[in-house]
Image (tube, grey):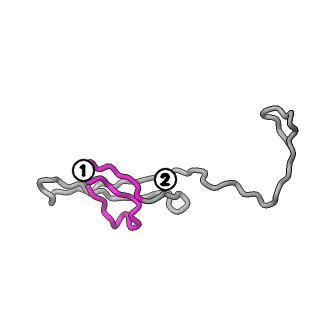
Amino acid sequence: FSLDRHTDLDRIFNIHSGNGSIYTSKPLDREISQWHNLSVIAAEINNPKDTTRVPVYVRILDVNDNAPQFAVFYDTFVCENARAGQVDQ
């Protein structure tokens, strides 16, 4: 197994040549790319000219990796006897 490097120019993915497992070699970021379209090439060991290509579509799920930001600073106080789940304003 191998990857067509024309479909992974940034070399974000690698493939195990023996079993075809695809794994990342760089961090993924959904803000940069939501999808990666790869082409996997499989070749017969005894006849390397006998190959086939399979498209692999990798969808990147979003993870909240950015802390919330507020336009202004807020100052609040909470009583020491406040109950769990109580709304403070």
Mark 2 is on which residue type?
Ile
Residue 73 relative to residue 52: left or right: right
Q: Which residues are magenta?
A: 1-25
Q: Residue 18: which disc? A: 1
Viewer-side residue, 80 vs 22: 80
**Residue 87 percent coordinates (x, y):** 83, 38
Mark 1 is on which residue type?
Gly
Residue 25 relative to residue 60: left or right: left
Residue drawn at the location 20% of the way across and 55% of the way down: 43
Residue drawn at the location 32% of the way across and 55% of the way down: 15
The answer for how far apart the CA atoms under marks 1 and 2 are is: 25 Å
Quarter of the image with the C terminus is top right
Residue, disc 2: 60
Circle 1 crowding by C-alpha within 10 Å: few under 14, some 14–19, many from 20? few
Q: Is residue 4 magenta?
A: yes
Residue drawn at the location 29% of the way across and 50% of the way down: 20
Direction front: furthest residue? 80
Residue 36 relative to residue 89: left or right: left
**Residue 16 percent coordinates (x, y):** 29, 52
**Residue 4 percent coordinates (x, y):** 30, 63
Find residue 13 and report its image quarter: bottom left
Q: Earlier in the sequence, mark 1 or mark 2?
A: 1
Find residue 8 and report its image quarter: bottom left
User: Tag 1's secondary structure?
Assistant: loop
Quarter of the image with the N terminus is bottom left
- Is 43 drawn above or below residue 85 in the view shown? below
